Image (spheres, grey):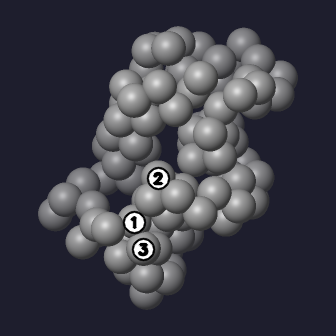
Amino acid sequence: MSFEEFQQSLVRDSAVPAGWSGALQALWYDGRGDWEGAHDCAQEDTSHDGSWVHAYLHRKEGDEGNAGYWYARAGRSGPPKGCTLEAEWAALVRELVGRGAGK
């Protein structure tokens, strides 16, 4: 799957495609404007990827302290300086689909 195919699924599919990792499912829900659905998926995914998405979601929520905790759990120091939420979302999707997390 490519980044573009992921974006198309946001419009085309009425439900998150089967077989995706919890982290990728969370990004799909977030891409459709469903923060709660995204958070539920990220919270259940205890991997480093799930923690990174969880951090992004709390950053989006404006809870920097909680985001920092989840970035640390993901083994990351945080987003790159000046990184927008949109850029971080795209980076997350690109990395996860690039590694086949959507299979």
Q: Which residue in the protein does label 3 denote? A: 73
The Cα atoms of the two marked residues, 1 and 2, are separated by 7 Å
Q: Which residue in the protein does label 1 denote? A: 74
Q: Is residue 71 left or right of residue 20?
A: left
Residue at 27% of width from left, 61% of height from top?
A: 79
Location of the C terminus by quadrant is top right
Visible in this render: residue 97? Answer: yes
Disc 2 residue type (three-letter): Asp
Visible in this render: residue 56? Answer: no
Foreground of the two, 14 or 53: 53
Name above or below for residue 59 compared with residue 36: below
Q: Is residue 96 left or right of residue 43?
A: left
Name above or below for residue 86 compared with residue 59: above
- Residue 36: % across, % down: 75, 59
The Cα atoms of the two marked residues, 1 and 3, are separated by 4 Å
Q: Which residue in the protein does label 2 denote? A: 49
Residue at 59% of width from left, 63% of height from top?
A: 46
Disc 1 residue type (three-letter): Ala
Upstream in sequence: badge 1 or badge 2? 2
Disc 3 residue type (three-letter): Arg
Q: Quick check: marks 1 and 3 in contact, CB under 8 Å?
A: yes
Name above or below for residue 83 compared with residue 2: below
- Residue 102: % across, % down: 57, 27
Residue at 76% of width from left, 26% of height from top?
A: 18
Q: Quick check: marks 1 and 2 in contact, CB under 8 Å?
A: yes
Residue at 59% of width from left, 14% of height from top?
A: 8
Foreground of the two, 58 or 33: 58
The Cα atoms of the two marked residues, 2 and 3, are separated by 10 Å
